[in-house]
Amino acid sequence: MKRPAVLIAITCAVARVAAAQDPGPAPQPHHISASAGVAWLVGHSLGGSTAALRRNEPGTATPGPSTLFRADTSIEQSAGVEARLAYALTRALEVEVGGAHARPRLAVQITQDVESRPVALRDATFSQYIVDVSALWQVNALELGSHARPYVIAGGGRVWQLYEDRAKLVTGALVQFGGGVRYWLRGGKSRTHPAGVRGEVRLQVYSAGLDIPDRTRIYPCISVFGFFGF
Amino acid sequence: MRQILAVVLTALTVAGAPAPAFAYLKFGVRIGANSVDLKWNAPVRYFVTDRPTADVPVAALSAAIARAFATWQRVSTAMVRSEFQGTTIVPPGFQDGRTTLGFLDRPDLDGALAATNFLIDANTGEIVEADVFFNTRFSWSTASAGEPGRIDLESVALHEIGHLLGLGHSALGETETDAGGTRRVIGSGAVMFPIAMSSGSIADRVLQPDDVTGISELYPSSDFLETTGSIAGRVTKAGRGVFGAHIAAFHLQTGRLIGGFSLNDNGEFVVAGLEAGAYVVRAEPLDDVDPDGFFTMPVDVDFRVAYATRLVVVPRGGGIGAIEIAVSPK
């Protein structure tokens, strides 16, 4: 009489372990997946700078400034395209190589010119190319239903900013970090080629990128991708 | 026999004084059908007159001139060299084949602090000698912090040695004119601005980006021309070119201001020696200085300040052309 009870108990125990180890959707280790989508760059100010002469101020070799005019520059919000290629090291960790292209518009306002009214220069477009290498960590412990999992991403890369006629504005460095959610429309738990969508928000820290007082800045970037596993 | 051409090129003036001068960013001389930049092809070997003033002994004069030469020589993107040859009893302006700097009493030029003149070989355009006088009609100072009521000798020497090296005047500056017609500097963006700051000022001991660009374009270091670019364009009024408009190119990231001019009736200008980057380009009439101090032909000053309608991005080692700045009459 004892044996059936033991057998049932063992069966239940195995079922609980199986439920706890249900892997949910995740990348297949040692497989490659590709993502492509659109990225939205949030508009932001690049700062301002003052064209200044030296004030006629006897007694010092470094007199204060006398303003000729001031220029305030901003980047308007814009959409771009982005593609990423990922290699899964484990079911949680992937290494991604990404490339992005956008064509933001620069706007410049001229003020404080005593000889001229405020002037808005015509918007000018520049091309921005980013290549980055990032690590993507899927947080499998956080379940968002049976098809979705959140992840965090961090990495770094290079930025090339070219003006309309391909003249180089600046080459800079980029560090980015953020997070998002992947939703599997297919696969993710089996060897079937997985496919789905992913959305993420990243903060991109540019150094030596286009900025008016030359400094490091943080820009938000929102992306939506479709992905496909091989 | 060498043909000699004597040219009084320029003077640094004080408030209200007419400048017996003409200039552009660089001096040029016409040799036959060609225009040749006026520049030294060897180190500037110079003498200093042994005439002191009541305020400035010869040793202090010589030291101030040496500091001014050294300031130009320290420009890392230019190849300027000079050699002090000693003192001389011969005053500046005496045609002896020697480049001489020193004090001279010029009551006829009581508005000119100092001036530079050249002797040029009319066949080759080579500089035979160049002399600089500092007018003893003014009270001079060599005090390290300057002295109220006195003109800083080193500042004026730096300006005049700029001429001696071949630079003309810069128009990067703003002035105001009082009821008596006297101009006073409000702000200056170049040591080579033709009107001196107020007495007691020592600001012009420090070269500004416009000065550095000018000397670097004239005596470029090995990589200067490869690493800098230029902006070319036209200033127009009602579709016609404007001669003598002052152009200021402002680098948005570094804040450096570099000047230039439209130099023909088509209103064409080139501002060269610019580091790569995004620029705001501004055109203004040449009305903060005496235009006769810059050009021998009449200059159009009847227009309002205007800007190039877009940012201008200068590539490294290249040029951006066809920038048009349309101005309107005042």
Image (spheres, coloured by chain):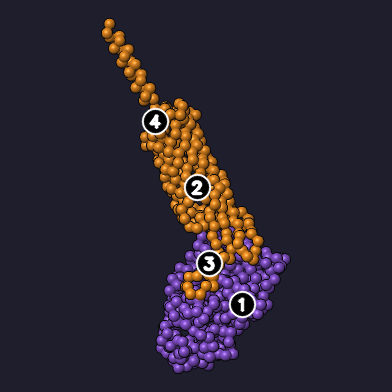
> Left or right: where does residue A172 sit relative to residue A124?
left
> Left or right: where does residue A66 sit relative to residue A27?
right
- The secondary structure type at the circle numbered 3 is strand
**What's the residue at 60%, 68% (across, down)?**
B247
Three-letter residue code for mark 2: Tyr
Three-letter residue code for mark 3: Pro
Q: Which residue is mark 3?
A: A65
Query: For mark 1, does the 10 Å Cα neighbourhood hold few (<14), some (14 to 19), or many (20 or more) residues?
Result: many
Q: Quadrant of residue B173?
A: bottom right
Cα gap from disc 2 to disc 3, whole angstroms: 31 Å
Cα gap from disc 1 to disc 4, whole angstroms: 77 Å
- Name chain B's colour: purple
- The secondary structure type at the circle numbered 2 is strand
Quadrant containing the C terminus of chain A in the rendered view: top left
Q: Which residue is mark 2?
A: A219
Same chain for marks 3 and 4?
yes
Q: Which mark is residue A141?
A: 4
Cα gap from disc 2 to disc 1, whole angstroms: 48 Å
- Nearer the observer: mark 3 or 4; the answer is 3
Three-letter residue code for mark 1: Arg
| Chain represented in orange | A
Residue pushed farthest left? A2
